[in-house]
Amino acid sequence: MTTPLKQALTAASALPQTEQDKIAELIFREIERLQKDETPKKPFMLKPVTKGSGYIDTSINHDAVLAEFIYTNKVSQQSR
């Protein structure tokens, strides 16, 4: 155990029991958070799409392409 941790626990032991319980809960939560952060993450693999949108500038004009797609589909669904 490190000196700062010993000093912190000694100081905490002088507090009322309810305050000691709150500090213990904070310590356990922090330990749990640190343990979760140390677990290796599964790599996220992207799969390329088999069919594109047909637009070559979608990344540049994303909003316009999306709006056009929504408008086209709304109009075609309403006419059915």
Image: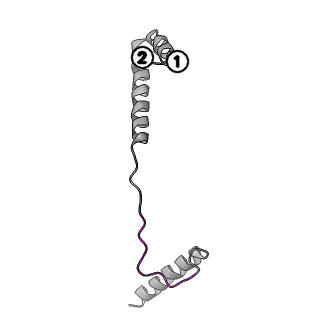
Q: For this view, does 7 lie left or right of residue 31?
A: right
Is 41 one of the magenta-colored residues?
no
On the image, the x and y values in percent for residue 34 come to 43, 35
Q: In the displayed structure, would residue 54 be above or below residue 11? A: below
Tell me the magenta residue range.
Answer: 45-56
Is 47 one of the magenta-colored residues?
yes
Q: For this view, does 32 lie left or right of residue 6?
A: left
On the image, the x and y values in percent for residue 3 come to 51, 15
Seen at 44% across and 22% down, the residue is: 23
Q: Quadrant of the C terminus?
A: bottom left
Seen at 39% across and 43% down, the residue is: 39
Front residue (pair 34, 63): 34
User: Label 1 to label 2, Cα distance in Å?
Assistant: 17 Å
Q: Secondary structure at mark 1?
A: helix
Q: Secondary structure at mark 2?
A: helix
Q: In the displayed structure, would residue 39 be above or below residue 62? A: above
Question: What residue sits right under mark 1 in the picture?
Answer: 4
On the image, the x and y values in percent for residue 13 come to 44, 11
Q: In the displayed structure, would residue 62 be above or below residue 74? A: above
Question: What residue sits right under mark 2 in the picture?
Answer: 20
Q: Of callouts 1 and 2, which one flags the residue occurring earlier in the amino acid sequence?
A: 1
Q: Quadrant of the N terminus?
A: top left
Q: Amino acid at mark 1?
A: Pro
Pointer 1: residues within 10 angstroms few (<14), some, or many (20+)? few
Pointer 2: residues within 10 angstroms few (<14), some, or many (20+)? some
Q: Amino acid at mark 2?
A: Gln
Residue 77, disc: none
On the image, the x and y values in percent for residue 26 come to 43, 27
